[in-house]
Image (tube, rainbow, N blue to C red):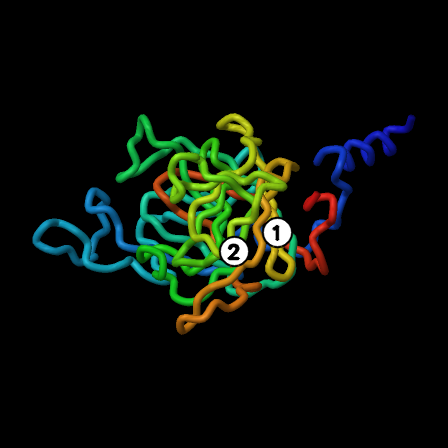
Amino acid sequence: MTKALLAILGAVFAFGPSRVQEPEGQSLFNGRDLAGWETWLGKPHKAIDVPGLERNDRGEYTGPVGLDRDPKGVYTVVEVDGRPALRISGEVWGAVTTKEEFENYHFRVEHKWGTKKWPPRDAEKSPRHSGLLYHSVGRHDAGGTYWMRSFECQIQEHDCGDFWSVDGVLVDVEAANRDPANPRSDLIYKKGAPRIQGTTRRVFKESDNERPAGEWNTIEIYCAGQTSAHVINGKVVLVLQGLRQRVDGKETPLMKGRLQLQSEGAEVFYRNMSIRPIKEIPKELLQ
């Protein structure tokens, strides 16, 4: 067998037996700067020093740092493992956001944890935390002064792929109560389970497919119509349906928006961000 053929087969099977090699699509990160993105930083924790930002008599900040202001260097382009990466320090909560909206797409990014943690996270006990927010719309400060209204693919140690509702977005999902004795508990995704309609509750992914800290992980989101699939290192861990929001009291489909990568108390690196249009989510991901 030739070396060329071995290389092709290795690429095909890198994502597992049910996946096929797909075109890389449009790069969203040029490796030099944040062209095509904008930054937002919300209200800092009072233990973080942000010169010139107003505080009240209790030492708490009274407002956010704001749009495209980054006095702490939360978002920088660095070299990691010999290649360019976006470093998000996590020191102030917020997000870096694409300027462009996307609809019906496959987004792929690689992420790796750093070592730093910041208040209010417990440096010893709290897991490292970030997130990929998709179909992001509206104000930057809709979610706790930090994030736009959106669907979150959780990026947190051992919880990569979970769903969080940011600013009240709703989903339908095949799931069960994580605590069977509590009908209002968080949910856990179970393919084939009864469909929970219109929930804003956290939905835990089906299984942990994250690699150990210090290694790169591949996070993928497939979105088509009102359906999305969260894929961690080649494994589908969660499928959501009926993606929607409330507008003037009415439930309305939410099928497009911007992409955000969160700053949320922990150092994290991102690289190899790409997006490509799709007409539908591959059937093998939904089975």
What percent of the width, then of the height, locates residue 62? 19, 58
Residue occupying image coordinates x 42% and y 41% = 186
Q: Is residue 188 visible in this depiction of the protein?
A: yes
As measured in the structure, the alpha-carbon distance from the residue carrying label 1 to the one carrying label 2 is 10 Å
Where residue 169 appears, as percent x and y from the top left, is 45, 58
242 versus 287 height, above or below: below
For this orientation, the residue located farthest to the right is: 1
Contact flag, marks 1 and 2 (Cβ < 8 Å): yes
What residue did someone put label 1 on? 107
Residue 193 coordinates in the image, percent (x, y): 58, 41
Q: Quick check: 260 above or below 266?
A: below
Residue 19 sits above or below residue 106 on the image: above
Residue 272 visible in the current orientation: no
Identify which amino acid the numbered label 1 is placed on. Phe
Seen from the viewer's position, the closer of residues 48 and 240 is 240
| The quarter of the displayed image where residue 192 is located | top right
Label 1: how many residues lie within 10 Å, few (<14), some (14-19) or many (20+)? many
Residue at 54%, 40% (x, y): give it: 189
Residue corresponding to mark 2:
134
Secondary structure under tag 1 reads strand
Residue type marked 2? Tyr
The residue positioned 52% from the left and 43% from the top of the image is 270
Mark 1 / mark 2, whichever is N-terminal: 1
In front of the other: label 1 or label 2?
2
